[in-house]
Image: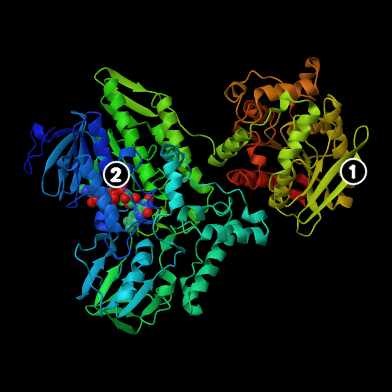
Amino acid sequence: MAEVQSPGASGPSNQFDVVVVGAGFAGLYMLHRLRRVGFSVRVIEAASDVGGTWYWNRYPGARCDIPTTDYTFGFDPELERLWTWSEKYATQPEILRFAQFVADHYELRGDIRFDERVVAARWDALASRWCLTTDSGLQLSARFYVMASGCLSQPKPPEIKGANRFLGEVYFTSSWPHDEVDFTGKRVAVIGTGSSGVQCIPPIAAQAEQLTVFQRTPNFSIPARNGPVKPERRAQIGKDRDAYRRDAKWSRTGVPVELPTVMARFASPEVRRERFEAVWSLGELIPMYGVFADQALFPEANAVVAEMVREKIRSQVADQEVARLLCPTDHAYGTKRPCLDTGYYATFNRPNVRLVDLRTHPIRTITEAGVVLGDEVMDFDVIVFATGFDAMTGALVAVDIVGRDGLTLKQKWAGGPATYLGLMTTGFPNFFTLTGPGSPSVLSNMMVSIEQHVEWVADCLSRLRTQGLDTIEPTELAEKGWVGHVADCAAITLHSTANSWYMGANVPGKQRVFLPYVGGVDAYRQACEDVVAAGDLGFRRSGPGGTQCNDGVIRRMQPDVSRVLQMLSALNLPTFESLPVDQARALLAKLTSARPPGPAVGEIIDGTLAGAVGPLAYRLYRPASVGPHPVLVYFHGGGWVLGSHVSDDPLCRDLCNRAEVLVVSVDYRHAPEARFPAAADDGLAAVLWIAEHAAALGGIPDSMAVAGWSAGANVAAVTCQQLRDRGGPAIVGQLLLAPVVDCDTARPSYRENADGYVLTAALMRWFWDQYADSADRAHPKASPLKARDLAGLPRACVVTCDFDPLRDEGIAYSEALAAAAVPVQHIRGRGHTHGSLTMVDVVVSGAAVRADMAQAVRNFFKQQPSLAEA
Ligand SMILES: Cc1cc2nc3c(=O)[nH]c(=O)nc-3n(C[C@H](O)[C@H](O)[C@H](O)COP(=O)(O)OP(=O)(O)OC[C@H]3O[C@@H](n4cnc5c(N)ncnc54)[C@H](O)[C@@H]3O)c2cc1C
């Protein structure tokens, strides 16, 4: 193994395969893992010893807030056999001892250079190597450069005027002295009430003569209920350690907990209370993220949890005015990192503790003697700053990292970090970030995420070596795709509504971007594995023998759509086409009965109207606003075989509210009992009846559009053609969601999306078989795309979904309408399946598309000639 020489040396002994920055848990395991597979490694660490977070953050009360039996290395059973955690949440000294034990056990220290801070790193394109420089002038050269520099390791300076004037004792929780600090008899100020503040305030209050807590924004905190590790927990892990650790790896957060199924929005007050109390009593952060299955996504569900936590806060604090100040009201539960505490709220009942609300009493300045608040001068002996970190990107951009073509990391990330998998970034070959932005990192049990990244990087380097390659870099396409996917994951949660450090909001001037990957540890791990299985998809890899690149995007589907597909697949349901028709209908009815009901509308009326050969049922959805309203006649999906006028109930409610129209969802006769052209004939008959009765239904006469999903969109499109051909009544627009418009199953979308997305190519063929003889299928009443002339049809909005066999025919219809001079808007359901946009209140990512659809419907009526003229 090569040896580091004196500062400034640049001889071969300062050349390594890999330089790793940081000797926290990530750096330690990276070193161990790389050494095991035969790479020469040097770790550079700014501190004087190993431990990272647990080396620096030595403030009183510092502990982990993930149970230590989970917040531990799981990669080596031997390590677990040799080390036993004493408490549910171990103290900082114990965790630091563990890091030291790991370093000793694997004899890692010999390859770590302490008290050395990397200040610059430059990619040498000619040599395909990184050149690193430390603050002492030491230079190192490495083929690969790994930043294991920590997500919460770059302290944020306090932005308070006069902060460095204070002449008393000053401490930062993030770099606490190694000798014990004695607060006895002292007047102490603690500024900041994030996780560190919440942990250190109770023990400081117990010692100090006076403690003043300066709070800018209150955080949610739950009681840790700390104590010895419970025997049940030990037994659970001991029973099958390997299975436990495997479950952790494939869990949402890196701790195996049961996923919630109860939805706060639909549960009774009793069920909500019972569920909340059960989770509250555990004293664990991760289960509190999932008291209810919908709390991270829906404000009204989150409000249930938030209010119950506030209730608990109020119950712990004697002075209700102080309690009010301690209760967070400006963010949803979980959108800022909640804290775990031991006696935090009760501390404010002590006579020597005062809370100052900085929102109403901002600090004017810090002076030599203390703090000036408005007119009040407060003298202190000690100030403790618990002001947090420049999270996730801070330690990375603190180093002057210069990649290909002179681009610096700081410049590249000025608008927010862009990474591929949170592991690499385009323009910086052979540069890896452990638990980097765009990976689960701070939203997970970090030990599990660290292990996964370390193993992925070690395997990646080994693979390169085996394949005779020496350079790797993500492609722009892959990185752009990943950044988009990370944003999609965040967009469906409430996270972006909070001013949190996850968003970079605590650092002035930092771009507001949701930094970690919120799609789940399990989904993330799967994506990383899929990248490898697909031949290092999205990476350009080169060596003396040439360059390899299998370019592409690893995740294009909306994350909530994937989750729904996973859930459906876990149900192991039979396919519709494998069942007799009556059983297929029963299966659909069972599935639709289990979904959320959709939003409330002003009024719902069920009735019947005259179809082509007999009465047809309809359901009318009236907006809450004063009518009359424009009328939207809606035809349900189900391949002409399944469903009814109520089977798309949530979608109809949603359209009714968003577009503020009277929706009349009409049934039509189904195949195989009533084959082609029964559905088409009923569609026409229904529209004629509704046109005639519009006023009586509460609609505006002569102000009618049609809509439909799937086969229902087929009925809607066909109805428009029939009405045009018979000369009216006039239809102002047609909204076609994932329409069947052609019987041609040879288009690429049929092949690409043949299977796996509920509407399969096989099911679509079955639907056609039920509905129409081969000879009839090309008739425009079955395949409206085959109509000889599309001119003169009502303006259209065609919505297609990426993962839908019908995608390409929808696009083709949209293009054909445009070619026939019909005004048409094409909306792409990016990352959606044939059915996912109809899953109101389940697939949150569909809401934006449905908003666009509703706007299109509003536009139909706005552009209606008669109304426009009026
Ligand atoms: C108070 C506190 C409590 C926490 N509790 C939990 C918890 O309960 N559960 C959980 O999952 N996570 C927790 N975390 C997050 C914690 O940071 C991670 O769990 C984990 O310790 C990170 O390990 P790491 O090796 O990635 O980074 P770190 O432990 O931060 O180590 C990074 C190291 O890199 C060094 N370094 C950085 N830049 C340079 C440079 N340029 N040159 C040289 N050296 C450099 C630093 O000095 C540091 O020692 C907590 C964080 C804090 C601050």
- Quarter placement of the N terminus: top left
Q: Quadrant of residue 57?
A: bottom left
Could you tell me which secondary element the residue under label 1 belongs to?
strand
The answer to whether 469 is drawn above or below residue 307 in the figure is above
The answer to whether 57 is drawn above or below residue 121 in the figure is below
Q: Which residue is mark 2?
A: 82
The answer to whether 840 is drawn above or below residue 504 in the figure is above
Q: Nearer the viewer, residue 46 or 250?
A: 250
In the rendered structure, find residue 567 and report the number of the disc placed on it: none
Residue at image x 33%, y 60%? Answer: 388
Counting the numbered discs, the total is 2
Q: Nearer the viewer, residue 512 or 204?
A: 204
Q: Quadrant of residue 581?
A: top right
Tell me if 411 is positioned left or right of 502 in this view.
Answer: left
Residue at image x 40%, y 66%? Answer: 342
Q: Counting other residues with Cα less than 10 Å from the Cα at mark 2, is it few (<14), some (14-19), or many (20 or more)?
A: few
Q: Position of residue 252 (x, y in %)?
A: 48, 44
Q: In this orientation, does residue 640 appear?
A: no
- Measure the C-alpha gap from mark 2 to mark 1: 74 Å
Is the residue indicated by label 1 positioned so its CB lies within 8 Å of ligand 1? no
Q: Counting other residues with Cα less than 10 Å from the Cα at mark 1, is it few (<14), some (14-19), or many (20 or more)?
A: some
Could you tell me which secondary element the residue under label 2 belongs to?
helix
Q: Which residue is mark 1?
A: 608
Q: Earlier in the sequence, mark 2 or mark 1?
A: 2
Q: Position of residue 792 (x, y in %)?
A: 76, 32
Q: Position of residue 349 (x, y in %)?
A: 43, 78
Q: Please say if the residues under marks 2 and 1 sit with CB atoms less than 8 Å apart.
A: no
Q: Label 1 is placed on what type of residue? A: Thr
